[in-house]
Every structure is written in C-alpha cells, then in structure tokens.
Amino acid sequence: MDSRVITITSGKGGVGKTTTTANLGTALAMQGKKVAVVDSDIGLRNLDAVLGLENRIVYDLVDVVEGQCHLRQALIKDKRLPELYLLPAAQTRDKNAINSIQMEQLCEQLRHDFDFVLIDSPAGIEQGFRNAIVGADEIIIVANPEMASVRDADRIIGLVEAAGKPEPRLILNRLRAEMVKRGDMMDVADVLEVLGIDLVGIVPEDEMIIVAINKGEPIVYEKHSRAGSAYLNAAQRIIGKEVPLEEVEEVQSFMERLRRMFGFGPAMAEKRVRS
Amino acid sequence: MGMEDTSESNISEAQSNLEREEKQSVQGNIAIKGTRNGLLLTLEPETPFSELLIALSHRLSEAPGFFWGASLALDTRRRNLRISERTQLEELLANYQMSVTPLEQTLIVKQHEPEVISTDVSSELSIDVGNEPIITTEILSEQTQEQASRLDPRDSDDTLFLRRTIRSGQAIQHASSIVILGDVNPGAEIIASGDIIVWGVLRGMVHAGYPNNENAIVCSLLLAPVQLRIANLLSRPPDGFQVQARPEFATIKNGQIVVEAWLNGHGRTTRK
C-alpha cells in the first residue's frame, strides 16, 4: 500500500499542532482515505479530547509498544468517520517511556493498515520530538505568524534536515488578516522569507475553533468556518490536488512591503529611515 | 606519548560510556575515542566517505546530549579527508555545536615541514601521514597556535563554502573564511577566523576574525545581524535601527566596527 507517514510538529508549544492533526486527519478521512492519527505527546495527551474520543480509551501507544496489547486493540474508531482511527498517548507516563526504534517499528506497523498516518508531535526538540519524526516520510510544521514561533520553526527545519528527512512543509496557523493589514502582524511573505519552505495551508484565526475543541468536534465539520475550510483545502493539497491558497491579506503598498520584507517584525516598519 | 596512552589515563564514567560507544561505532566503520584533549574520530580507510558520514550521523543522533558542544580531533593516520569531505563533516558536526580541532593540521606541519610555517593547509590535508606514532596533541596545538597567530587565516585557501540556509540553532565554526550562498537566520551562529561573506540575508550572529584578526570583514546582501563581532569587538544594531535594503560590509576602523554600503562592488576599496 502506498501509505504516507506525516508528522505534525512545531518546536514551540501552543501553535495548533494538535488541532491541525485532528482536522487534517478528519479532512483526509472525509476524502475517503483510511487515516490513523497518533498522539505522541506522552504525558500530555490532548488529541483524544479534540476528537471527542477521550472516554473510549482503554489501551494507549505505550501499551502497544510494551506489548501489553495488540495495535488494533488500542486503535479507537472515530465517532463519525469509519475510516478514521486514533492511537492515543499514555497520560501516566512520560516521553522516555518509548525510544526511537520502538516508534519507528510502530510507524511501520501502522503503515500496513492505513493510507495516512498522522503523528501529533509534542512541543520541544527532545526525545519526544525525535520519536515523533523518526518514522515519518514527511514533516509538516505548524507556525503562527509571530517571531518566537517562526524562530522555533526555523530551528525545527534544521533538525529535520539533520535527521535526513525531506524538507518540511508549512501550515501557517492563526493568521489575523486585519492585524496584517494594519502592519501589526507578520504576513505570509514575511514568514516564508525567513523559513523558505513550501506552504501547505494558511489557517486564519477563528473563534469557532475554541468552541469546536471544547465540544470535541473538529472544525472541518463546520461548513461556514474559514479555519475549517482552510484545513479542508490543506488536506486536498496533501493528497496532491491543486487548490489555490486562501486570500487572507490585502495588497500592501510597495514601500510598506519593501520595508517589512527586510525586518523581522512589523515593529521595524515604524522605525526611522537612515539617510 | 601516543594518543592511546592519553585515552587510558582518563578514567571516569564518561570514559566507560565512551568505550561502550566505541564498540558500537566500530561496526559502523567509525570509531570515537576519548582523549585528554577531547574526542578523537577515526575513520575506516576502505569505506566510502558517504557511508562514513551516515554512520557518524547515526552515531551522533543516538547520544546528542553527550556529543553536544564537544570538540573532535580527526585521526588522519589511516584516512585523510578531501576538502569537500571535510566540509561535509563540519556541516554535520555543526548540528551538534561540535567543532573539529586541528589535530591533523598540526601533525602534518610537524612531520613534513618542521621548520616552515605552512600557509597552504588545504593541500597538506591530502598527504598521507603513514603509521608513524602521533606525538601528544597538547604540545603540537600550542605550537600551531603560535604559528597561526603569525598568519592571516584569510591567506589560506581553505574557505568553507556553504550552499544552504543556516537556521536557528546551527553553528558553523571554521578556521578560515566562510562563504554562505543562502540566508543566516536568527539564532544561527557563524564563527570564522577569516572573513564572512553571506550572499543572502544575514540575521543571525556572526563573528569574523575570531579570535583576534582585526582585518577580517563581514559582508552580506542584507546586513541585519542580531550581533556582529569582528576580532575582539562586538556591536549590535542600535535600538530603532532601520535595516538598509542594500549590500553592506562591516570592518574595524579606529577600534570600532563600522558598517558601510558596498558600492559598485568595490566595498573594500572605498575605505578612507
């Protein structure tokens, strides 16, 4: 089977890795793909809650790795989509409960049964991160349009390349068009200028995401949500369909563009021009 | 005293780790030994360099915490590296903040040209040293430092050329000049004993003329470093500094780091 193992990571925490994993997984399953989403954030599991499956967990990833159960016993079938499965993380253990070799073997096992295996990586660059990428064919980096997140993403790209993986792709999350318009937020071009990697999707900031997470329903089910449709489009691009990137920003004046292009953040734009 | 002696004289927990690791890594055609002066890397002479590099990469990734920031001497008794191979090795080590100490250079200078100061390190690198016993590196490196201080590292043709973006957390250190075709991002560190030339946007930290060559320059298509150091001077952009969208170069003038536009491609000749 021509299956793909994709790790979603970011370096920085709180940028939307888990939300992205849940929504891309759901969107891919809606396209008729057989999908496993794996929560590798051992000790801080959340993917189950975002998918609304937390009360169905019996066995988890560490149980599988330690041979306490079979893989299919630990896989939880989604409430709505018959082709979507979750492999939850253990909550009572930590990142060192499994090693890279075990994780690689697990990915190979999952690869046999699924079209897509999406791995939700923990934040950071330590063992948990290394476990998350070791078995991956592709890496998707989630970043927010702000300096700390972009720097961490840059660091991750370097580590991914050092690990011998192909160049990662980017999902730019939580973009606020009105702030970009005011020049108060880095825009898409600013981020790409630094990172220099391909874009898979641009997801606008959307209050409905918080509601969706609290309800345990991925935002892609919300027909009118802009974030939801952005994730649907990103999933299409992952499958290989050509979908134009969302229009999220107004065209800026030439001078503004030029000034912002070279600074790291919008603060630069207001600064004095040296004669 | 031979290298083997020094490795045995150091008994510690780290040492026992090393011995265990050595056994594993010998299988991958590379051996890493602990010595008083740091780690010593031996490469299998018959194996293709690309395989050695992969083996080393695996080796490092297994215990990144252990190797982080370590300095590594290259044992050239059994295998010498070409310049391109050495560059690849340095690139790999840079991911772990590791640096290559000039054991090989000191050895070659000592054994082949005891009286002459070699400025052409690169061509020396390919000379086979044979199986002669190695003299303690400590004494040798002191001598070379003395020799090196009398040389301008920029006269060496051992320039490191990197065709990629240097990203946050990556550190490149080189005993001569460095040319980068790509950007240097914030959080990256470039340290060169000679000049640093960035054909791209320079946003990270750079240190040219390390540790004390005041003639070194830094130039870039867009000079916006977090911090810029030349020799023993340090500068950072003043608050409210507007980055100029033009090629610039930095030099030391009257004991200060000065940044000027690179005019008509004659940046260095425009100095007054």
Image: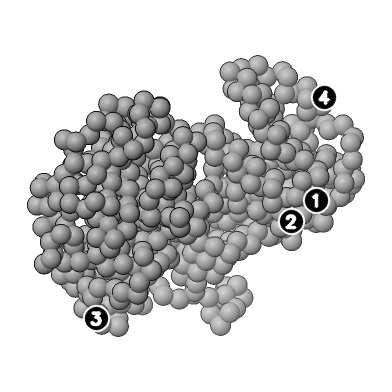
Q: Quadrant of residue A154?
A: bottom left
Is residue A259 visible in the rendered structure shown here?
Answer: no
Mark 3: amino acid = Val
Do the residues marked 2 and 1 share a common chain? Answer: yes
Q: Going 50% across and 69% down the picture, which residue do you hit? A: B200
Label 3 vs label 4: CA separation? 70 Å
Packing grade of label 3 (10 A; few <14, some 14-19, many >=20) is: few
Q: Quadrant of the N terminus of chain A?
A: bottom left
Label 1 vs label 3: CA separation? 55 Å
Packing grade of label 4 (10 A; few <14, some 14-19, many >=20) is: few
**Percent of width and height locating residue B133:** 87, 31
> What chain does badge 4 belong to?
B
Is residue A129 visible in the rendered structure shown here?
Answer: yes
Do the residues marked 3 and 2 share a common chain? Answer: no
Do the residues marked 1 and 3 share a common chain? Answer: no
Q: Are marks 2 and 1 in contact (CB under 8 Å)?
A: yes
Tell me the tag on residue B125. Answer: 1
Can you say whether A190 is above or below A250 in the image? Answer: above
| Residue designated by label 4 | B1
- Labels 4 and 1: the sequence-earlier one: 4
Check disc 4 and report its element: helix, strand or loop: loop
Tell me the tag on residue A251. Answer: 3
Label 3 vs label 2: CA separation? 48 Å
Which dot, 1 or 3, sits closer to the camera? 3
Is A208 displayed left or right of B23 in the figure?
Answer: left
Do the residues marked 3 and 4 share a common chain? Answer: no
Check disc 1 and report its element: helix, strand or loop: loop
Packing grade of label 2 (10 A; few <14, some 14-19, many >=20) is: some
